[in-house]
Amino acid sequence: MRLIAAALIAIALTGCASVAVDDVAKGTAAKAATGQARDYSVFLNRPPLLPDYTRVELDNGAVLLLLEKPEVPLIGFEAIVRGGSTADPQGKAGTASLLAELLRKGAGERNAAEYASTVEGLGGELDTGAGLEMLQVSGSFLSSDATAAVGLLADMLMRPQLDESEFLKLRDRAAQFIKAAKDRSPNRLLNIYAESFLFDGHPYGRPSFGDETSLATIGIDEVRQYYRDQVGADRLIVAVAGDFETDRMIALLRGAFGSWRGAAGKMPEYGSAEDVAGGRVLLIDKPDATQTYFWMGNVGVSKYFPQRASLVLTNVVFGGRFTSMLNTALRVESGLTYGARSRLSRPRKAGSVSISSFTATETTVEAIDMALDVLDKLHESGLDDTSLASSKAYILGQFPLAFETGRQLARQIGQLEFFGLDTGYINAYAQELVKADRAGIDWVIDTVYPERDELVFVLIGNAGAIRADVAKYGKLTEMAIIEPSFSPR
C-alpha cells in the first residue's frame, strides 16, 4: 500500500541527509578550526518562519487555523483528528490506519473512482494517513477551487462511505505488504519490531498499520465503530495556508464543519513508558538472511523536552547525517555497512532513542561493537567546538526548507495546535540553536542517550549463525520472522 510503503521507507531512511548541505557545514567547521567566529546574524535577522495566523474554535470544538500566503495561487491544508493508532481497540492494531486509507475510497455521493477522478480533475493532491496519535489528511488545490476543496475534505471526514469491498482490498493488501517486507525488505520492519519490543504493553508498542494477526481480526464493523467513537468535530484541527481571504475561508469551513457531531468515545489516556532495563536482546530469525539488521536503544524523550536545540544538534553529529560519527565509523572508515544512523522519536509522551544499521552476517558482532564504541565516545568526549559549529550551520540551513509552501505551513501550524505549542516553538528555534553550548550538549548526552549497559537490542538475521555471538549483549528472546506478530509470544 502506498502510504504504508512510504511510512516504512521513511522509518528506514530516518537520519539520512543531503551531502550538499554538509558543504555549508564544512565551511563553518573550517572557520571554527581556525578560530574564526561564525556570524549567525544572517539566520537571526530573517523574518519569522511562521507569521501570525488566525485561530477560530467552533462551538462543536473543531479548531480552524488560517494563514494567508498570497504569493502563489494555491491553498494547502492539513486536517488532524486526534487519536491515531493509540485509540485502536485492544488486539486490533491497524484499525486507524485502515480507516485512514478507506477515507479516500469513496465519500459523499462519489465512489472511490469518482472521488479520485474529481480530485485529479481539479489538479489537486489529497493524502491520508494514520500515526501513533493522529489521523491526517493533507493536500493542496488551486485557490480558485477552494470551495470544491473544502467540500471534498468535508465529504471525506463527515460522510465517508466506508465501503466493505474497498475495505477488504485494503486489508488484504496491507497483510500482503507485511509478508513481502519480511521476505525481501526486513530492514523496513526493524523499527516496528524494536518499538513493539521496547514498548511492550504500552500504546506506543502497537504497530500503527497492524500486523498479520491483528489485521485478520479487523472487519468493516470495527472500522465503522472506530469512526463513530474516535472521529468527530471535537477531535478536529483544520489548518489552511495559502492564497485566500481569511474571513471567506472561515465562512467556508464553518459552513462545512460547524454542525458536525462530536466523537462518541473517549480519547485514549496513557502515561510515558518507563525506561526498560538494558541487557535484553530480541533476535528475529530469518534463516536465509545474508545480513544482520540491528537496532539498539531505549525509551527517550517527548516533544516537550526543554533542551530540544541541544538534543537535535547532538543527534546530527552523532548519527543524523552522512558525516555523522556513526556513519563515518561504520561506513566511511570500516566499510561494514552502507549506512548507520541514530533516531529520535518524540511524540506526546516519551518516545525512543536508538541506533540502527546493518552488516554482513559474519561481521555482525564487529559492527555492533563498533557502534557501541562510538556511543562510548559520545559519552566520554561529547561534541567538540568544530562539530558543534558544523551541526549548527547544518540545521540552520535546512530548517527553513520546511516552511516554503502553503501545504508545509499548514502542516506546521496544525502540528503546533496538536501539541499545544505556540509560534515561538518555531520562530525562536534559530536563537536556541545559536545559544546552545557544550555544557548543554553534555547534559543532553547524559540525560537522553543510554550507556551501553542500558541498551535493548533487536536484531533480524540468521539466528543459527549469530545466536551464540550476540548472546553476550544480554538475555536472548527469539522469534521467527514468519510469525504473524511483531512481538514474541
Image (spheres, helix red, strand yellow):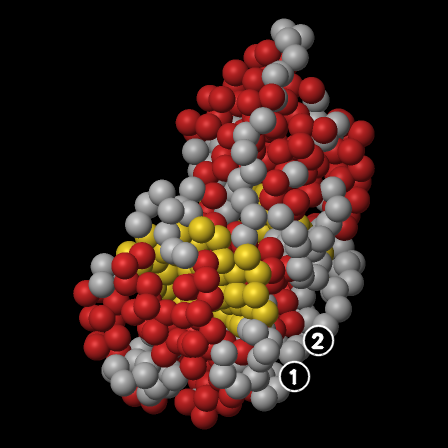
Name the residue carrying label 2.
269
Graded by Cα atoms within 10 Å as few (under 14), some (14 to 19) or many (20 or more), the crowding at tag 2 reads few
Residue 69 spot, x, y in % from top left: 42, 47
Q: Is 213 left or right of 177, judged from the image as shown?
A: right
Most foreground residue, 167 or 205: 167
Name the residue carrying label 1.
266
Q: Is disc 2 in contact with disc 1, using a CB cutoff of under 8 Å? A: yes
Image point 41% across, 89% down: which residue? Answer: 220
Q: Is 18 left or right of 346, judged from the image as shown?
A: left
Mark 2–mark 1 Cα distance, whole angstroms, equals 9 Å
Residue 141 spot, x, y in % from top left: 31, 59
Q: Is 198 left or right of 81, judged from the image as shown?
A: right
Outermost front residue? 247
Q: Is residue 155 visible?
A: yes
Most foreground residue, 32 or 123: 123
Graded by Cα atoms within 10 Å as few (under 14), some (14 to 19) or many (20 or more), the crowding at tag 1 reads few
